[in-house]
Image: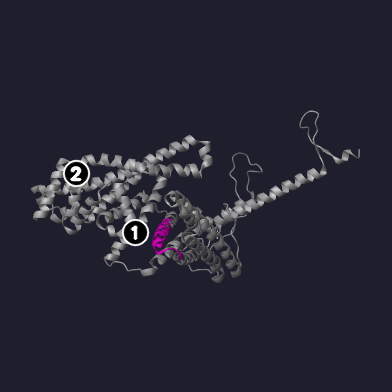
């Protein structure tokens, strides 16, 4: 009996062979379980340092010292995360081209990719933004206590109807009944998990709009100064359009404003300005952007240059014309037209004040042959690019869904690739077809005495005026209707910054707007981040999902 008490018997693993556990072994097993649980807790804690779980609780900070400590912790986390992201991206790009670098310089390339100035600048920028914003957004309610404002009749971008209401967490939660009332389906006192409770607090607890707007503006204006001058414009532009998007969505939801096909209209207007700048004011667009449009449109550089010179200077660029003729790929009819144009330019004869169709598509005699030819060329050129954009994210970022139903993911990505490639092909067709149409219409009117006498000359000249090159870009932008509805807003946000930059530079050249000097990017970033953070802190659902997730990872709920 005494000997038996020293053993514990488990269920037999095989008939006739009982397995014995001594108290020491049982205690060791228990300690292993405790160690495993502690390890998992530490792992979970380490993961939270890198990646925020959804529903992180709002931090209550009663004193300025608490605000300062919270801002410092948030800045350190944001800077570390930013450094890791930028260094990882630089490392991937370096490894892609490392085979082109001499062997003795490869280590230096990797070291600069990880610890280079770009990674440090990016970390400093986001760390500064997090520090300043977190301190101000939490300190402003302490420095400027809430008062009862007078009723206002005019709303401003930072007003909020709910900002004077008590923003308390509801103490009850309703569950939808799907049958007879049961203990699980009745209105009861909420006993939520930390994640669910914090998620409700994040949704319900708002700040005053002007608090978040002011904090975001100051933080953005200071943080952008860490970046290079060349990158400040790009960052400021992107954040500005995101701020406009969030502000518009917020107010359209608040006042019931709905513009049918609003994203398509924004895209079309932006494309009108961009394509006008491409043909008439190439100096207002970045050279890389011009080169991309050149490749996508499959127009020759000489043809676009000839059209620019003819419209703006009313002369023929003979060097560009000779280059087109020397290529020898023009059709017989177009070759004769080009030679006649050259002879008139040399002899002082009449010349068109625009780029003729023979210059823009010398290989094809008929303008009716251009659409199919351009569509096939653009479709084949863009299909590999769009395939990568449609196939890689679902496979790499949604691996579980891909494993569950790979066929559905592949079919959907394939259809998306075809659809996007067709969108750009139709864009090019509409643009070039519109240019051919207005030039052919002008030539037929001028060749007909009846129409020349009937229509006023200023009205006819509008067909070949500088402003007429805005219309084909706008019409081509309507091709966005081919794209999926969920992608339209993102594409509109992609082209809008370039169109705004082009319009600003053109207006500045005419003296219509002031010069911003060295502080323009900082001011624009401050304005942009004021709008973005005001929307994020009070109605984050009005920001795009990508922007909302990025801000949450770097900034948290407050």
Point 25% across, 49% down: residue: 300
Q: Which residue occupies the foreground of this view, 102 or 464?
A: 102
Q: Name the residue furthest bottom.
A: 143
Percent x, y for residue 123? 50, 61
Q: Quadrant of residue 64?
A: bottom right
Label 1 or label 2, whichever lies nearer to me, is: 2
Point 34% across, 51% down: residue: 267
Mark 2 packing: few (<14 Cα in 10 Å), some, or many (20+)?
few
Q: Which residue occupies the foreground of this view, 375 or 265?
A: 375
Percent x, y for residue 391? 44, 41
Left or right of 196 in this view: 548 = left
Image height check: is 359 above or below 313? above
Q: Which residue occupies the foreground of this view, 542 or 375?
A: 375
Point 47% across, 34% down: residue: 407
To which residue does mark 2 refer?
A: 328
Image height check: is 139 above or below 432? below
Q: Quadrant of the N terminus?
A: top right
To which residue does mark 1 refer?
A: 500
Sequence-wise first label, 1 or 2: 2
Q: CA distance from mark 1 to mark 2?
A: 40 Å
Q: Which residues are magenta?
A: 226-245
* 21 in magenta: no
Mark 2 lies on a secondary structure that is loop
Left or right of 378 in this view: 48 = right
């Amino acid at each position: 009996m005494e000997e038996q008490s020293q053993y514990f018997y488990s269920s037999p693993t095989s008939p006739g062979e009982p397995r014995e556990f001594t108290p020491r072994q049982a205690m060791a097993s228990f300690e292993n379980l405790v160690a495993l649980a502690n390890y998992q807790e530490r792992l979970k804690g380490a993961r939270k340092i890198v990646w925020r779980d959804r529903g992180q609780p709002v931090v209550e900070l009663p004193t300025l010292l608490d605000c300062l400590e919270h801002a410092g912790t948030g800045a350190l986390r944001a800077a570390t995360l930013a450094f890791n992201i930028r260094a990882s991206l630089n490392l991937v790009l370096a490894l892609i081209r490392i085979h082109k670098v001499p062997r003795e310089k490869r280590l230096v390339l990797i070291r600069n990719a990880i610890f280079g100035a770009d990674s440090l600048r990016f970390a400093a920028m986001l760390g500064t933004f997090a520090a300043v914003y977190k301190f101000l957004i939490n300190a402003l309610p302490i420095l400027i206590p809430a008062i009862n404002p007078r009723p206002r009749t005019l709303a401003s971008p930072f007003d909020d109807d709910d900002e004077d209401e008590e923003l308390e967490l509801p103490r009850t939660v309703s569950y939808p009944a799907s049958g007879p009332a049961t203990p699980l389906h009745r209105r009861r006192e909420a006993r939520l998990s930390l994640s669910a409770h914090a998620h409700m607090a994040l949704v319900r607890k708002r700040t005053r709009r002007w608090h978040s707007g002011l904090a975001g503006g100051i933080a953005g204006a200071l943080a952008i100064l860490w970046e290079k001058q060349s990158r400040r414009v790009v960052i400021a532009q992107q954040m500005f359009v995101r701020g406009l998007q969030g502000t518009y969505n917020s107010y359209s939801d608040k006042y019931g404003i709905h513009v049918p096909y609003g994203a398509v209209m924004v895209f079309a207007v932006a494309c009108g300005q961009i394509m006008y700048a491409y043909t008439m004011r190439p100096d207002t667009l970045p050279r890389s952007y011009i080169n991309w449009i050149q490749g996508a449109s499959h127009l020759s550089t000489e043809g676009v240059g000839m059209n620019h010179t003819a419209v703006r200077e009313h002369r023929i660029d003979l060097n560009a014309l000779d280059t087109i003729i020397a290529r020898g790929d023009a059709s017989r009819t177009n070759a004769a037209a080009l030679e006649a144009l050259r002879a008139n330019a040399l002899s002082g004869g009449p010349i068109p004040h625009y780029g003729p169709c023979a210059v823009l598509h010398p290989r094809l005699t008929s303008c009716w042959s251009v659409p199919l030819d351009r569509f096939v060329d653009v479709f084949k050129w863009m299909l590999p690019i769009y395939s990568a954009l449609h196939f890689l994210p679902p496979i790499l970022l949604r691996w579980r869904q891909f494993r569950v139903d790979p066929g559905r993911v592949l079919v959907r990505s394939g259809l998306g690739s075809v659809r996007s490639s067709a969108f750009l092909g139709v864009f090019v067709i509409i643009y070039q077809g519109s240019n051919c149409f207005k030039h052919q219409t002008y030539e037929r009117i001028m060749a007909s005495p009846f129409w020349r006498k009937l229509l006023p000359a200023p009205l006819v000249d509008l067909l070949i005026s500088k402003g007429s090159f805005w219309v084909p870009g706008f019409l081509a932008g309507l091709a966005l209707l081919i794209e999926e509805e969920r992608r339209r807003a993102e594409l509109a946000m992609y082209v809008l910054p370039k169109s705004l930059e082009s319009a600003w530079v053109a207006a500045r050249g005419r003296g219509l707007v002031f010069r911003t000097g060295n502080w323009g990017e900082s001011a624009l970033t401050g304005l942009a981040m004021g709008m973005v953070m005001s929307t994020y802190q009070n109605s984050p659902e009005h920001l795009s999902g990508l922007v909302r997730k990025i801000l949450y990872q770097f900034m948290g709920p407050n």
